[in-house]
C-alpha cells in the first residue's frame, strides 16, 4: 500500500513539473501559476521523502542489498 502511494505521488510530481513548464512557456512570466506549481512540486517531494523515511522506520520498506 505504501509503495503505491509513493508511486502515485511521484506521478503527481511529474505532472506538476510538466504543468509548470507549460505555464512557464505559455504565460511568459505574467502570472503566478509557475510559482504555484513549484510550491505543489516541493510539497509533494517533501511528502514523498517523509513517506520513504516513515516506511524505512516502520519496516514497510527495506533497502535492496545486492
Image (cartoon, grey):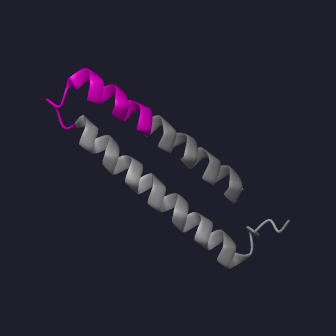
Give residue 23's quadrant in the image: top left
Pinpoint residue 60: horizontal percent, then vertical percent: 74, 69
The stretch drawn in magenta includes residue 21: yes
Give residue 57's quadrant in the image: bottom right
Q: Outermost residue, front direction?
A: 66
Question: If the image is split into quadrants, where does the N terminus sit?
Answer: bottom right
Q: Outermost residue, bottom direction?
A: 57
Pinpoint residue 42: horizontal percent, then vertical percent: 39, 54
Pinpoint residue 51: horizontal percent, then vertical percent: 58, 65
> Which residues are the magenta region?
17-32
Left or right of 38: which side holds 5? Answer: right
Magenta stretch, main secondary structure, is helix
Give residue 31's quadrant in the image: top left
Q: Is residue 48 above or below residue 62?
A: above
Left or right of 37: which side holds 62? Answer: right
Pinpoint residue 26: horizontal percent, then vertical percent: 26, 21
Q: Is residue 60 above or below residue 2?
A: below
* Residue drawn where x is 80% and y is 65% of the image: 64
* Residue drawn where x is 62% and y is 53% of the image: 6
Q: Outermost residue, left direction?
A: 30
The total of numbered circles placed on residues is 0
The stretch drawn in magenta includes residue 16: no
Question: If the image is split into quadrants, where does the C terminus sit?
Answer: bottom right
Q: Is residue 2 above or below residue 25?
A: below
Q: Outermost residue, right direction?
A: 66
Left or right of 64: which side holds 53? Answer: left
- Between 21 and 47, the one lying in front of the other is 21
Amino acid at each position: 500500500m505504501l509503495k503505491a502511494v509513493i508511486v502515485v505521488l511521484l506521478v503527481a510530481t511529474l505532472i506538476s513539473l510538466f504543468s509548470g513548464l507549460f505555464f512557464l512557456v505559455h504565460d511568459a512570466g505574467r502570472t503566478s501559476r509557475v510559482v504555484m506549481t513549484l510550491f505543489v512540486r516541493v510539497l509533494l517531494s517533501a511528502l514523498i521523502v517523509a513517506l520513504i523515511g516513515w516506511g524505512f522506520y516502520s519496516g514497510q520498506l527495506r533497502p535492496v542489498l545486492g
